Amino acid sequence: MKYAIKTLLLLTVLALMSCGGKDEKKEKEQIKIGQRPKTEKKVEKPVSNEVPASKQITLDNKGVGPVKNLELGTNVDQAMANAGGELFKNKCTACHKADRKFIGPAPTGILERRSPEWVMNMILNPEVMVKEDPVAKELLIEFNGSPMANQGLTEDEARKILEYFRTL
């Protein structure tokens, strides 16, 4: 009987000691007076203020190519725009959709972001533009390195497409 009481007493002491250890651990995690609670620092991603090339407005840039100066009339030449629409449909829609991003940027509103000379030079001289023009270089990067194919258009055909862009 004496042995059973000692064993029971020993088990009780061991049980109390095991419970006491957890309390100490909890105490370490608790906030002590005068201490600031530990807070996890959130890693915030820096907010990019960069505007993608397709959204940038660079009306003073005329690009690199044969078109140095181009004045657009106040009214759209509808016959020229219709012809440009057909050319765009036949030559450009493999990579460009009029109102949405596709392989290349959408031309809708392009003349609000680019000069007419830049657009003409991009149509007529895409290889040199992506090598030398900073906006064309950024567009190439934005559109996953897909360079604009030279369709071999004449300056008159490019002008018709530009007139079509004015209607979008």
Image (tube, rainbow, N blue to C red):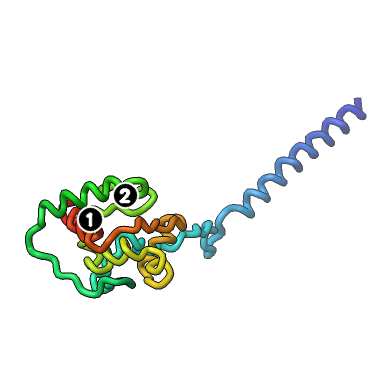
The residue positioned farthest toward the left in the image shown = 75
Residue annotated with mark 2:
91
Closer to the chain start, of discs 1 and 2, is 2
Where residue 153 sits, quadrant-wise, is bottom left
Give SS at disc 1: helix
Please state if 135 lies on the left or on the right of 81 as rendered: right
The residue that mark 1 highlights is 161
- Are the residues tagged 1 and 2 within 8 Å (C-beta)? yes
| Amino acid at dot 2 | Lys
Q: Position of residue 10 (x, y in %)?
A: 84, 36
Calculate the distance from the C-alpha at mark 1 to the C-alpha at mark 2: 10 Å
Q: Residue at x 33, y 72 (%)?
A: 64
Q: Is residue 62 above or below residue 139?
A: below
Q: Residues within 10 Å of mark 2 (few under 14, many from 20)?
A: some
- Vertical side of 85 occupied by 10: above or below: above
The front one of 39 and 49 is 49
77 left or right of 9 in image: left
What amino acid is found at the position of numbered circle 1 in the picture?
A: Ile
Q: Residues within 10 Å of mark 1 (few under 14, many from 20)?
A: many
The residue drawn where x is 72% and y is 46% is: 21
